[in-house]
Amino acid sequence: MVIQNSLFGIDELINDAINLLRKHEPPEGYYLCFSGGKDSVVVHDLAVRAGVKFDAHHNITTVEPPELMKFIRDNYPDVINEHPKISMYSLIVKKRMLPLRKSRYCCEYLKEHGGQGRIKITGIRSAESSRRAKRERVEIDKQGGLFVHPIKLWSTETIWEYIHLRGLKYCRLYDDGFHRIGCVLCPYGKYSSALREIDRYPQFVAMYKRACNKLYEINKDRLQNHKWTSGEDMFNWWIEGRKWHDVIADCNSIPLFSEDDGMIL
């Protein structure tokens, strides 16, 4: 089988990934970033097959789908759950802004804080975004940490082919039509996905709306002449803006927030 966006077949990709993991294995073992999604399931299996030492960690964000948490709990007892110091609700209020495509501060606080000083294995792939396509398979981040991305060259089709060839279990949210199964209402998700999640997870919708109401109260004086008249309006803007994202890839709606100042009018 010829893999999309790659000159390699699946056997070559598997061997290449395993050899990459063996080549960079540190004495203390890898820190494997595990989300419970299809890519991390494949990376976990590859690390086992490579025979490298690792410990897998799932950084809880407090807005994961319950089905995903159950999948990890039932099928990956070795995965260490890392609990955050702050919830998504409290983080939104603290930052005085909602997470946006170009300001995903939530990842920094809730997902990317673990494994300092360790060599990390991730499941990022070039096919996911133009930004990820520019990254190297082995790279050093701004803090000097080393990352290894063994499936960076794999297409989505290859991921599923590997899962079925190996008989790996995966979260059944994929069978329900979900393409991304991370944080509920992630700003990187499509508008159609947001509508599905709003219908399926009312408890998270209620949390985000509470946060929007709090943000509105905090900034009420600055919003006197704004089209928003409530936190509900703010929430709807946050969701509706994804329609534009679906048409213009890798683009953000007009910024009404900033990291430094919170609300921008």
Image (cartoon, rainbow, N blue to C red):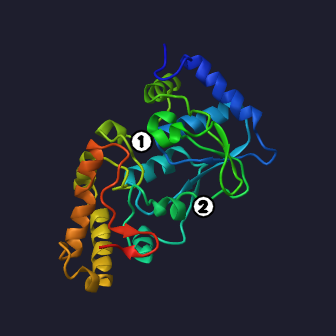
Q: x, y (%) of residue 150?
A: 62, 34
Where's residue 21, x and y in %? 70, 34
Earlier sequence position, callout 2 versus callout 1: 2
Going by the numbered disc 1, the residue's amino acid type is Cys
Task: Pick the residue in front: 29 or 8.
Answer: 8
Residue at 28% x, 47% y: name it: 193
Relative to 149, say whether 67 is above or below. below
What percent of the width, then of the height, locates residue 232? 21, 71
> Measured from the top left, where is residue 201 in percent x and y?
28, 57
Q: Residues within 10 Å of mark 1 (few under 14, many from 20)?
A: many
Q: Residue placed farthest to the right in the image?
A: 27
Q: CA distance from mark 2 to mark 1?
A: 25 Å
Looking at the image, residue 160 lies above or below residue 192: above
Query: In which quadrant is the C terminus drawn?
Result: bottom left
Q: Which residue is mark 2?
A: 113
161 lies left or right of 264: right
In this rendering, would 184 be left or right of 149? left
Q: Quadrant of residue 183?
A: bottom left
Which numbered disc covers residue 191?
none
Q: Nearer the viewer, mark 2 or mark 1?
A: 2
Residue depicted at 32% across the width and 69% down the height: 207
Secondary structure of the residue carrying tag 1 is loop
Quarter of the image for residue 138 reads top right
Whether residue 261 sits left or right of residue 205 in the image: it is right
- Badge 2: few (under 14), some or many (20 or more) residues near its Cα, within 10 Å? few
State the residue position of label 1.
171
Q: Is residue 188 visible?
A: yes
Query: Which residue lies at the image location 71% right of the left edge and 27% below the top edge?
Result: 19
Residue nearer the viewer, 30 or 260: 260
